[in-house]
Image (cartoon, coloured by chain):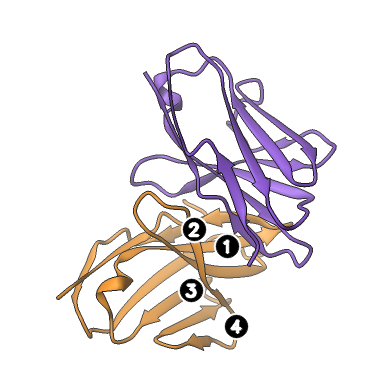
Amino acid sequence: GAVVSQHPSRVICKSGTSVKIECRSLDFQATTMFWYRQFPKKSLMLMATSNEGSKATYEQGVEKDKFLINHASLTLSTLTVTSAHPEDSSFYICSATDRTDTQYFGPGTRLTVL
Amino acid sequence: RKEVEQDPGPFNVPEGATVAFNCTYSNSASQSFFWYRQDCRKEPKLLMSVYSSGNEDGRFTAQLNRASQYISLLIRDSKLSDSATYLCVVELGGNMLTFGGGTRLMVKP
């Protein structure tokens, strides 16, 4: 089946730094990718919808200047957490839909901000 | 009121038991429904889609009641490997998924 990768899988950074997370669809083109966030023992929360070549659509309450999303190609979307703080520590998961609208999830990136 | 609600559990059941999870959703315009399974610290994986006519996949049976805005998942003959969190997921449209809080299942020997 289709595969979605994320890099890095884990990152630890100091407060105030920016962290970039990549999401790639490995064997299909994804016009739409989604970014989710999951807090410990909580469900996934959709952060934004990323469309190739256009601006991302952010969910209510998600700061677009804090979480920068770029979808530069049909196989790559990036999420940059700017000026990260400890409360940004979370599990970030991306997903991508193929031409049949089947959604595939990446393995997630665990961010820890010290 | 949450858009998708589930009993968080945990459900502790012995091997071989039958267990049922329920889920309710608030938006009557929801179009598609799914059950996902999530293992600890992993990404969610699609378990099965849920159709109005009800559908079965091996030991798993899913049902949808649009009138009551209610979805269920039945697991028969539980295995130790079924231990996980089961997420009820609703799609309003445009592939945008709304996740329930998940129900944790622990199958004991």
Q: Are marks 1 and 2 in contact (CB under 8 Å)?
A: yes
Callouts 3 and 4 on one subunit: yes
Give the amino acid type for the residue marked by disc 1 in the picture.
Answer: Val
Q: Between disc 3 and disc 4, whose residue precedes? A: 4
Q: Which chain is purple?
A: A
| A87 w.r.t. A21: above or below | above
10 Å crowding of disc 1: few (<14), some (14-19), many (20+): many
Q: CA distance from mark 1 to mark 4?
A: 13 Å
Tell me the quarter of the picture where residue B102 sits: bottom left
Q: CA distance from mark 3 to mark 4?
A: 9 Å
Give the amino acid type for the residue marked by disc 2 in the picture.
Answer: Val
Name the mark on residue B71: 3
Judging by the rendered image, the residue that carries numbered circle 4 is B52
Judging by the rendered image, the residue that carries numbered circle 1 is B90
Indicate the chain on which mark 3 is placed. B
In the rendered structure, the colour chosen for chain B is: orange
